[in-house]
Image (cartoon, rainbow, N blue to C red):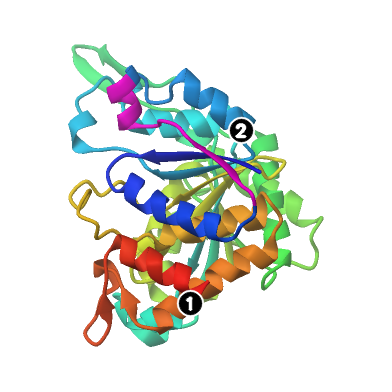
Amino acid sequence: MKICVLPGDGIGPEITAEAVRVLQALDLKFEMEEALLGGCAVDATGNPYPEATQKLARVADAVLLGAVGGPQYDTLPREQRPERGLLGIRKDLGLFANLRPAILYAELANASTLKPEVVSGLDILIIRELTGDIYFGQPRGIETREGERVGFNTMIYSESEIRRIGRVAFESARKRSKKVCSVDKMNVLECTQLWRDVIIEVAKDYPDVELSHMLVDNAAMQLVRNPKQFDVMVTGNMFGDILSDEASMLTGSIGMLPSASLDEKNKGLYEPCHGSAPDIAGKGVANPLATILSAAMMLRYTFANEAAATRIENAVKKVLAQGFRTGDIYEAGTKKVGTKEMGDAVLAAL
């Protein structure tokens, strides 16, 4: 079982180190090799997704990623920015389905900015299409028209792309509460009118799953108003990027949310939903739980080892029940710990 580890930038090396320790403690004979992605790759090679990383990622069974980016790269040419490395590896590996669970652990109900009764028991799975939409559509750019600069991007989806992600959503819902909410903006955007039409067609193959539709602006409001109405949400690349980050804060901290990005054969890239947090990088205070939980998703989806995945998730639950907290989820009466101490606690709970 070959894993490509990409620590990345900012807090990435700190949090991936803890996830790697947890994986090693399972004694499952993983072969793990590190490579560069993002800003650290730009510093070393001038390329955010260098050739050596491409080769390793392609032959690996799964990729574990920390985070990429930092303010020092914001003035670089766009093709050299760390985020281009992230978009590049997703496209290179054909990772089209991004799964982002938003689960509120009972011990963290008070960490959410919403009332406990609104979020208690929350368990949403947001499925975001990852290789299409306005992030990849052509033409795109900035040019001069009639004496002024004009920026433009193209939102585009093919029927096959929508059908493919739709099937992932319905298959996932079958293993949960059998409800899919498809999010679009069909009242304004023809691209998402096609999205809705195709999702309705896909739903015919899943008569046991209830399908609903919601415009993206209403979905953003409903996630705050009544988030527990959702089971599986499926949407396009840009809407999914925004809604999944919104959903993360329902759980108390984005530092708690793992994610999986999968191809058609369940090869995946696993990463926490949060960014590189350069303001706390190197201080040993970052929350590693999202990365550790991402490793659990790796075991579940790529390596089909449900028992090992559940072991990790139960260890995280135990650590939270014991009162261990990093700064982002700390509250009075709990034990504040740093990155490595949280990793130590998870290892002990295993």
Q: Give how far across and how far down residue 282 sits, in percent.
A: 22, 49
Callout 2 amino acid? Gly
In magenta stretch: residue 245? no
Residue occupying the point 30% across, 31% down: 39
Q: Is residue 130 above or below residue 172?
A: above
Q: Give how far across and how far down residue 273 sits, in percent.
A: 41, 53
Q: Kindly report which numbered mark, 1 or 2, lies closer to the viewer in this rendering.
A: 1
Residue occupying the point 68% across, 51% down: 303
Q: Give how far across and how far down residue 117 sits, in percent.
A: 40, 87
**Marks 1 and 2, how far apart at CA:** 33 Å
**Magenta stretch bounds:** 29-44
Callout 1 amino acid? Lys
In magenta stretch: residue 31? yes
* Location of residue 226 by image quarter: bottom left
Q: Which residue in the protein does label 2 denote?
A: 94
Q: Tell me if mark 2 has few (under 14), some (14-19) or many (20+) residues whose alpha carbon lies within 10 angstroms of its own.
A: some
Q: Is residue 248 above or below residue 131?
A: below
Report the disc number at residue 317: 1
